[in-house]
Image (tube, rainbow, N blue to C red):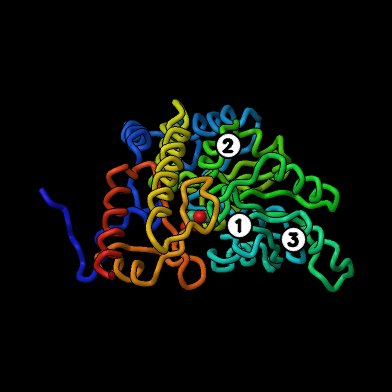
């Protein structure tokens, strides 16, 4: 049976366009089916939601406060809004999702909190850059810095070490800033460093984590994890007002149980990272291709010769131009197979050969 409904002109090969082009992982799907039995309380008062939050507390080895929302933009912007008042500012890397890919949601939900842009190599914020932004001005005419927001792994597929996180937290503490982490791919960072989640979060000074589920293998859903419970005050109202309180919460929560109960989240992340490594090695061996960032998680950024990028596009591959004119992003997920990678590499070789 074919369920293919290809639209005219639609790319055929989406494997590497993003980690959210893949489906739902089997563990999440099984839990979803199991949660479909019977009648249960709504709005998060059910046992699935309780169990999912408990599993997150176990995973992080911390009695944290947990909220489940539909997506990462909501998680980040509501978390930042809860840390800030309208006259505050948030410091993040200029490549941060919060800045570039959330349509101003953080500013909107916080009623005007300004985003200040910092720098650092390969998507990682330098402590000097944070220090400069905080101390640049101290007068009343400048929006008062209140939060440092980090992405782990970064938008460029690199990973902050616990040491780097600790140094950032030290600067943040010294200046009275809270530390927020956008962990849309947090699992990939844990897998990459082979460290327990606590070592990359509360032990390293992170106050609030937006823990990604979607790119890890859920259909939908991210968790907002407050390691400092006091910061979570009235966060439930923010979620509700923003349209992020799921009435049939068990369906948002149960897949987390499937993912966390027996370690599928880490296994999938490890697989995605290994796949990216394999892909990077294959791409690096092609003439004219250069790997642009260290491959530390599930992303590969590569500079492609124009003939290769164009040729792949013409052959139905969706390739995502991410950096400058010739820097392309390839993402791997729980679903990426070695055969998918070999198919792409073969297409690359054929395209290059045809271009002469
Ligand atoms: C995907 C992603 C998010 C979440 O995006 P949504 O589309 O809102 O779910 C957040 N941060 C980063 C770094 C991401 O890659």
As helix, strand or loop, the secondary structure at mark 2 comes to helix
- The residue to which callout 2 is attached is 193
First reached walking from the N terminus: tag 3 or tag 1 = 3
* Residue depicted at x 26% and y 51%: 343
User: How far apart are the alpha carbons under marks 2 and 3?
Assistant: 35 Å
- The residue to which callout 3 is attached is 85
Q: Residues within 10 Å of mark 2 (few under 14, many from 20)?
A: some
- The residue to which callout 1 is attached is 122
Report the front residue among 340 and 287: 287
Visible residue check, residue 277: yes
- Please state, as top left, top right, bottom left or bottom right, where the C terminus lies in the image: bottom left
Of all residues, the one furthest to the right in this rendering is 139
* Residue depicted at x 46% and y 64%: 303
* Residue depicted at x 84% and y 53%: 175
The answer to the question of whether label 3 and label 1 lie on touching residues, with beta carbons closer than 8 A, is: no
The answer to the question of whether label 2 and label 1 lie on touching residues, with beta carbons closer than 8 A, is: no
User: How far apart are the alpha carbons under marks 3 and 1?
Assistant: 30 Å
* Residue depicted at x 62% and y 62%: 106
On the image, the x and y values in percent for residue 173 come to: 82, 47
Camera-near label (3 vs 1) is: 1
Labelled disc at residue 313: none
Q: Residues within 10 Å of mark 1 (few under 14, many from 20)?
A: some
First reached walking from the N terminus: tag 2 or tag 3 = 3
As helix, strand or loop, the secondary structure at mark 3 comes to loop
Visible residue check, residue 229: no
On the image, the x and y values in percent for residue 54 come to: 55, 29
């Amino acid at each position: 049976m074919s369920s293919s409904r290809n639209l005219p002109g639609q790319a055929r090969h989406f494997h590497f366009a993003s980690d959210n082009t893949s489906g739902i992982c089997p563990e999440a799907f099984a839990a979803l089916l199991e949660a479909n039995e019977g009648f249960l309380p709504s709005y998060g008062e059910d046992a699935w939601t309780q169990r999912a939050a408990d599993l997150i507390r176990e995973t992080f080895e911390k009695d944290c406060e947990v909220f489940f929302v539909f997506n990462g933009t909501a998680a980040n912007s509501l978390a930042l809004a809860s840390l800030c008042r309208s006259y505050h500012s948030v410091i993040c890397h200029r490549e941060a999702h919060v800045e570039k890919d959330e349509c101003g949601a953080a500013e909107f939900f916080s009623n005007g909190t300004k985003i200040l842009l910092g720098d650092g190599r390969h998507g990682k914020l330098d402590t000097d850059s944070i220090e400069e932004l905080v101390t640049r001005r101290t007068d009343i005419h400048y929006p008062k810095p209140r939060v440092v927001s980090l992405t782990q792994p970064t938008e460029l597929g690199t990973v902050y070490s616990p040491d780097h996180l600790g140094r950032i937290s030290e600067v943040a503490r010294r200046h009275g800033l809270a530390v927020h982490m956008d962990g849309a791919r947090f699992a990939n960072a844990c897998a990459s460093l082979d460290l327990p989640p606590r070592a990359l979060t509360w032990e390293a000074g992170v106050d609030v984590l937006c823990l990604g589920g979607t790119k890890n293998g859920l259909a939908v859903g991210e968790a907002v994890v407050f390691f400092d419970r006091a910061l979570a005050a009235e966060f439930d109202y923010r979620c509700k007002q923003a349209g992020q309180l799921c009435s049939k919460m068990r369906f948002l929560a149960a897949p987390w149980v499937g993912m966390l109960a027996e370690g599928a989240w880490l296994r999938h992340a490890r697989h995605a990272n290994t796949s990216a490594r394999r892909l990077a090695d294959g791409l690096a061996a092609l003439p004219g291709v250069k790997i642009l960032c260290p491959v530390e998680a599930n992303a590969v950024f590569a500079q492609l010769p124009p003939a290769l990028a164009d040729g792949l596009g013409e052959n139905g591959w969706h390739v995502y131009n991410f950096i400058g004119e010739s820097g392309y992003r390839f993402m791997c997920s729980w679903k990426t197979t070695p055969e998918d990678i070999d198919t792409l590499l073969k297409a690359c070789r054929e395209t290059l050969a045809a271009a002469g």
